[in-house]
Image: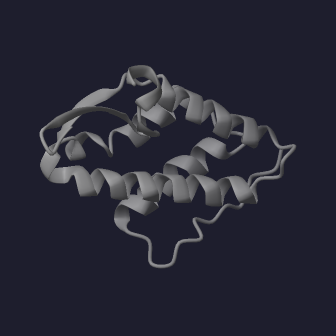
Amino acid sequence: MASLNLFSRIESPSEQEKQIFAILDEYAQPSSSTTASTAAQSIHEFAAPLLSDSQADGLENLLWQFWNIVINVARQIPCDSPSQERLVELVKALTEIPPTTIQIWGVSLPTSLIGLDWTKNF
């Protein structure tokens, strides 16, 4: 199967956005041997230094960056491509990473890379 020629479509991307895009670009390729859980763990590592009250804005920014890139990548992949299914597997793998509890304004909030984990705790 032919390689996908994907673009982040972000003007002046930050270094973090470039790295996230590189992970998604490599993972989405039909010839990629990277597993969904490996790609998910690589992406999740960006959140680790941001899991404190003082870094709440950084974590929010990471979520915006991540989802913007995922949506931009998904729009470029044909709907019948196996790479679309790979993106679904990646999102599923992200949901399987155990949530981390952080303190924001003195309140403990369970989080995951896909967003606050409201459904399991509220």
Q: Which is more toward the observer, 8 or 107? A: 107
* Image vertical order of residue 67 relative to residue 121, above or below: below
Q: Residue at x 37, y 59 (%)?
A: 16
Residue 94 shown left or right of residue 71 in the figure: left
Q: Which is more toward the observer, 72 or 35? A: 72
Q: Quadrant of the C terminus?
A: top left
How is the structure coloured here? Answer: one colour
Q: Position of residue 120 (x, y in %)?
A: 43, 21
Q: Residue at x 44, y 71 (%)?
A: 13
Q: Residue at x 65, y 44 (%)?
A: 28
Inspect this view and state whether residue 115 appears.
Answer: yes
Residue 82 shown left or right of residue 41 in the figure: right
* Image vertical order of residue 46 relative to residue 36, above or below: below
Q: Quadrant of the N terminus?
A: top right
Inspect this view and state whether residue 35 appears.
Answer: no
Q: Position of residue 103 (x, y in %)?
A: 17, 37
